[in-house]
Amino acid sequence: MTLIHDEPERFASSALEGFCDIHSHLVHPVRGGAVRATETPQGKVALVIGGGSGHYPAFGGYVGVGLADATVAGDVFASPSTESVARICRQAHRGGGIVLGFGNYAGDVLNFGAAATRLRDEGIDVRVIAVTDDVASAPKETPALRRGVAGDVPVFKIAGAAAEAGLSLDEVERLAQLANARTQSFGIAFSGCTLPGANAPLFTVDKGKVAVGLGIHGEPGIRDEAAMPAKDLANLLVEPLLAERPEGTSGRAAVLLNGLGATKHEELFVLWTHVARRLRGAGLTLVQPEVGEFVTSLDMAGCSLTITWLDDELEPLWLAPAHGAAFRRGHVEPRAVAGKPVEQDAEALCFPPASDASRESARRACAIVERLAAVLADAEEELGRIDAVAGDGDHGQGMRRGSFAAAEGARKALAAGAGAGSLLAHAGDRWADTAGGTSGAIWGLLLRGFGTALGDEAGVDAAAASRGMIAAREAVMTLGRAKPGDKTLVDALVPFVDALEAEVTRGAGLRDAWDKAAEAATRAAEETAKLTPRLGRARPLAAKSIGHPDAGAVSLALCARTVGDVLKAG
């Protein structure tokens, strides 16, 4: 159990506060994360890493000299918001561009990706590295579907060393991608982890069994096996990784044996004797191997093994000096920078000039967003029930929180004189930043994409709405990487946009066209019950999901119908 906490919902922020205080010589606290407190030269590439809390030393322990320049911390097992990522990136930026590093999870992909888009629009060159090392989570033929686990550590270490050496943004990105491609991990667990305040673990492992290939958020493994001696456990971990050895590698490898939170170091040392013997017997040369806790999962009992296949470029970067709270290599003396970062208070809202027609459309758009918030509040319990079938059951809560914040943001934007495009974009940002997670990021992309396409120069008619929804669809599918058939919100979004475009092309007005499109989205959402999930955390629970619709598709259809009702009411 996670026994020490105040209010459970403040666990992540309280832990971050304590971490920054005890390591104040290395990091400065900022809202939602921490930035490096040591000197960084102007022009240096900034490495910004992050993800959900509950994995310490990931990610704050890897901020420091030769490592990352900042970390962004979400709630426990939840992605940080787009706004947090973008804000901390701005503070870490030194003029050389930014590399964003995170594990390959849907919420992180969306929020870090959306932040990268915002920063690029501001003129900052940003590159994205999603670590994909877990061989149990997808076949060798589809590495982009693999999740990131303890392989984060060697990938970020190598990227941080490249940035510290003054290499260009192109080179830091290339070397990080090379390290990611040559890094594989495999894990096992003996018991599940328990969220702060919860009275039961996220999952359990039967007595006398070991769960093989599970994820660090409690995602199910690929099978259970009978408990076995350390020598056999070592073979269980090593064999899948040796099978992934890239062609032409020298056999020199960085190796991490990682404890998941409740496995004692002495146990890991016992296991290491067999792991090392098996790897050396296979002809590998172990280059500065590491044993300990590197990427944990609260109080989960278990471990993972990671191999990074080194070459003449990667090995010096793996061995380069580093000094962070949880990772030190060689001798490097951190030099504290004078003062602490100053975080500006939120500035008064300021929007581009808008036409009278656009401001009138903004008034109507604000009313629509307020209605969405009311409807989603009423639907919270039902959306949560649908989501709980193959997810964590928080979709209804996230939609309620996000839409409430969007409505508040829309009202403020309207009072500040925003046009329709700016109002919807601002409402989308507030939705994403408050709801967090995957659905929050998606709805932020939807509203921002729609609003950006509308602009503030004219009112919203059927043609403009169609263009806006096409842009919103492209934003979601580009960053979210979902396709029709994956059993996601996209399965309702694509039919909606297609129907809207077809009706507008035939000359229908906005009300009629939207009504037809909402009907198409509703039918498509119902049809997702037949689909097998191919993305996100529901993917390992595919069989359980069959026969039940996707919560994201259902909520999108609900929102489409709600907008249609408001349009009909004039």
Image (tube, rainbow, N blue to C red):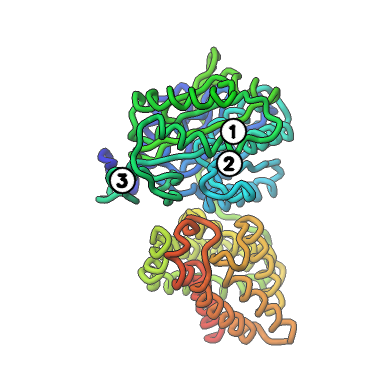
Where is residue 388? Give x, y as percent. 38, 63
Can you identify the residue that label 1 sits on?
155
Disc 2 and disc 3 in contact, CB within 8 angstroms:
no
Q: Nearer the viewer, mark 1 or mark 3?
A: 1
Q: Earlier in the sequence, mark 2 or mark 1?
A: 2
Where is residue 228? Give x, y as percent. 35, 36
Disc 2 and disc 1 in contact, CB within 8 angstroms:
yes
Residue drawn at x 43%, y 70% is 376
Q: Earlier in the sequence, mark 2 or mark 3?
A: 2
Q: What amino acid type is highlighted by mark number 3?
A: Pro
Q: Which mark is residue 196?
A: 3
Q: Residues within 10 Å of mark 1 (few under 14, many from 20)?
A: many
Q: Quadrant of residue 10?
A: top left
Q: Which mark is residue 250?
A: none
**For this rendering, which residue is in front, 29 or 76?**
76
Residue drawn at x 48%, y 66% is 407
Residue drawn at x 70%, y 78% is 501
Q: Earlier in the sequence, mark 1 or mark 3?
A: 1
Q: Is residue 429 placed above or below 273 in the rendered structure?
A: below
Can you identify the residue that label 2 sits on?
131
